[in-house]
Image: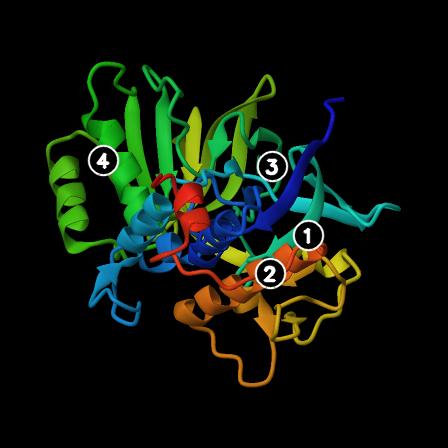
Amino acid sequence: MNAPIETDALVIGAGPVGLFQAFQLGLQGISCHVVDALPYVGGQCIELYADKPIYDIPGIPVCTGRELIERLTQQLQPFPPAYHLGQQVSELQRLPDDRFALRTSRGTDFVARCVFIAAGVGAFVPKRFAVEGIAAFEAQQVFHTLPADLNLQGQNLLVTGDNDSALEIALRAAQQTPHRPASVTLMHRRDQFQARPELVQALRDACSEGLMRFVAAQPTGCVSHNERLTGLEVLTATGDTEVLSADVIVASLGLSPRLGPLADWGLALERKQLPVQTDTYSTHESGIFAVGDINTYPGKKKLILCGFHEATLAAFGAAALLHPEQKTLLQYTTTSTLLHQRLGLL
């Protein structure tokens, strides 16, 4: 077993508030690691409104969710945290020395002096097929996004879903050269999509050109041979049963938030949210802070800009907790030599 990673702070959640939390910790001279269930940073901004406009970020008249995450990531460059993506924090317990031991779903262990829960409405996890037996092929032949290093040459690729991601994966595979798949099939329960109009048109064009095909159907079972998945049994929109050949399946069915293991950490919960003190945004457990949509307090508003405010005060609270011998002073990035040094400006 690897030794646990020791850190001043562990931030759970790499959405906009989690990223800004890491920045504010950096201003306080506190290093951190960041864990997120998604395989990339961005949280709800990327999953729910990556290309939709946001109008209420201070000083930015309009930006998309994707642009906001890009700006936050750029702002964080002076204090680059270590990211641990594609994994959930599954266990948390207090140690005798008042630090916290945490473990992720991938078996990564941490020992942190303080913990910041910026998990939004919960960890975003992929929606899964309700097909008996298919779980046995997860991460081997069944994926929720196409692994970058997966060689599709000669493989039958089946993509399911009606969103931008599903259509982009299918189109990219159908049009790629070299290493072209033997076949590319997109499946959804009906011939209507939530994807952008230009992607839907590109899909129809690719099907007309024979690069791929679309099947309106729903899965009813999986087909395997010699312990290897070979296809899906489906019920088509016309009521017929068909077997779709598949060596690789990408189930791009979207994501849903789950409170998950957080509910078992012994923290006080109020309607699946964490009550906090509004001077430091600490939970009832000293050293555990909650910022963003996961917390609750009188007058709480679920807005990104409110999460930024909470992250700022939480960072000051952590500084006072971690360095009680030092007076926590309010300093300004316009004039503070110390903050300029931390930002790499001197």
Q: In this view, does 99 lie above or below 249?
A: below
Q: x, y (%) of residue 224?
A: 55, 25
Secondary element under disc 2, as helix, strand or loop, is: loop
Q: Do the residues labelled 2 and 1 touch (CB within 8 Å)?
A: yes
Residue annotated with mark 3: 135
Closer-to-camera residue (14/39): 14
Residue annotated with mark 4: 171
Q: Residues within 10 Å of mark 2 (few under 14, many from 20)?
A: some
Element type at marker 4? helix
| Mark 2 or 4: the one toward you | 2
What residue is rendered at 45% in x and 41% in y? Answer: 79
Task: State the residue at coordinates (72%, 23%).
Answer: 2
Residue named by callout 2: 328
Q: Is residue 253 visible?
A: no
Viewport quadrant of the N terminus? top right
Q: Do the residues labelled 3 and 4 touch (CB within 8 Å)?
A: no
Nearer to us of marks 3 and 2 is 2
- Amino acid at circle 2: Thr
Q: Position of residue 84 (x, y in %)?
A: 55, 36
The numbered dot on residue 323 is 1
Three-letter amino acid code at disc 3?
Ala
Tell me how far mark 1 sits from mark 4, CA to CA. Answer: 54 Å
Left-right relation of 174 to 311? left
Sequence order check, earlier mark of 3 and 1: 3
The mark found on residue 42 in the picture is none
Query: Which SS class for mark 1?
Result: loop
The quadrant of the picture occupied by the C terminus is: top left
Looking at marks 2 and 4 on the same chain, the residue that comes earlier in the sequence is marked by 4
**How far is mark 2 from mark 4, CA to CA?**
54 Å
- Distance Cα–Cα, label 3 vs label 4: 26 Å
Q: Does label 3 or label 4 sit earlier along the sequence?
A: 3
